[in-house]
Image (spheres, rainbow, N blue to C red):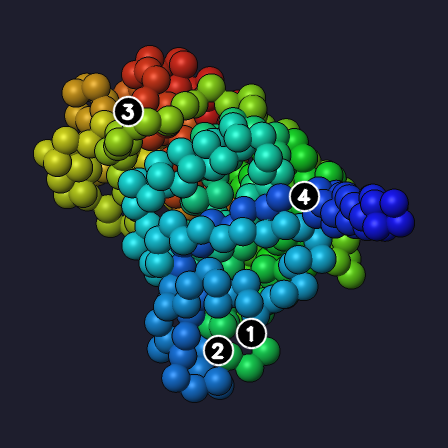
Amino acid sequence: MRFNFLAVLFAVFALLLSMTTVGSAQSKPNIVILATGGTIAGSAADASATTGYKAGALGIDVLLNAVPQVKEYANVSGEQICSIDSKDMTDDIWLKLADRINDLFSRGDVDGIVITHGTDTLEETAYFLNLTVHSNKPVVLVGAMRPATAISADGPMNLLNAVRVAASPASVGKGVLVALNDEINAAREVTKTNTITVSTFKSPELGFLGYVNEGVPEFYRTSARRHTINSEFNVNGKKNLPYVKVIYGTANDDELFVDAAIKAGVKGIIYAGTGNGSVHMNAEKALARATAKGIVVVRSSRVGNGTVIPAEQSYIDYHFLDGDTLSPQKARILLQLALTKTTDLSEIQRMFKQY
Ligand code: SIN
């Protein structure tokens, strides 16, 4: 009898203990870290080296072991998607990432995603996912300017902050976010502005969304353009994307690159023009030949700020579209996605006004 009473008491105690443990694990959000490489996973021979290292050398386990504090904010698991220097990013990896993220969110038990990424094309991946992930749960891209082996590496704190942002209810519905250097930016507006310094990611003119203050994400604004659950683009199961090239306008421009692009079979051209997306008269002749063949031409600008709006009558006559405020590299992504749905020019122009 006495034995039975003790056994029951022990069982009740064990049950209560397990409920407390499960309860605390459940009260933290489940965050999956998808690792792609970059300087945040970079390894140099010398701790003072900030160049000449191998980007993407360290796996996600090494990065997570360096920042055990992430466990205070979330139940974290890691997956290695690829291990590249992000200058070598491909449409294939983007499609794989979008598929994986949509798949993880469809499971229901994943509350947020962090993607570790090289800084060179981080803004492009962020914008691609902003248009192709169909969930309002947080997706946060993070990188670093100094390799993981450097004195005062920026990666560990950036990774911790990215997990904090992904775990925060305040990040829900904000679209894909980019969190580095204690600042949170929107995928559509953010760009790398400095080749070397850690304060490189900015959203010029339109401004960043918020800070991570002492570990707490604080938002002050949102991006007004369509994204994630309001995006009409769906790449699930797609194996490739339409071929779109950016051509950079300069003084003394000519027809060479446009003609080469036409010959190569591109479906779209982003012309990174001068000023308000202005097109050199020589390139204009070649771009007119492109639109006559059904290639979609979008005028963007190499200036870095401001809206590209309708200008010369000839641009209208040749059916060149306007790229709004998107940088040439992001206009390329939107045109790729637009071309997965339509070649109708007024529809594509609508998309440039909405995304
Ligand atoms: C890269 O983009 O993979 C290398 C540069 C960086 O991450 O800062």
The residue where tag 1 is placed is 153
Q: Nearer the viewer, mark 3 or mark 2?
A: 2
Q: Secondary structure at mark 2?
A: loop
Asked if residue 236 lies left or right of residue 218, the reply is left
Near mark 4 (Cα within 10 A), the count class, few <14, some 14-19 or many ≥20, is many
Could you tell me how far apart the alpha carbons at marks 4 and 1 are, in whole angstroms? 27 Å
Q: Is residue 189 visible?
A: no
The residue depicted at 48 percent of the width and 63 percent of the height is 61
Q: Mark 4 or mark 1, which has the lower sequence index?
A: 4
Closer to the camera in the image, 5 or 288: 5
Q: Position of residue 104 (x, y in %)?
A: 49, 35
The answer, for residue 71, to whether it is visible in the render is yes
- Mark 4 or 2: the one toward you: 4
Residue drawn at (35%, 58%) of the image: 83
Q: Which residue is mark 4?
A: 29
Q: Amino acid at mark 1?
A: Ala
Is the residue at mark 2 in contact range of ligand 1, meaning its CB lies under 8 Å from it? no
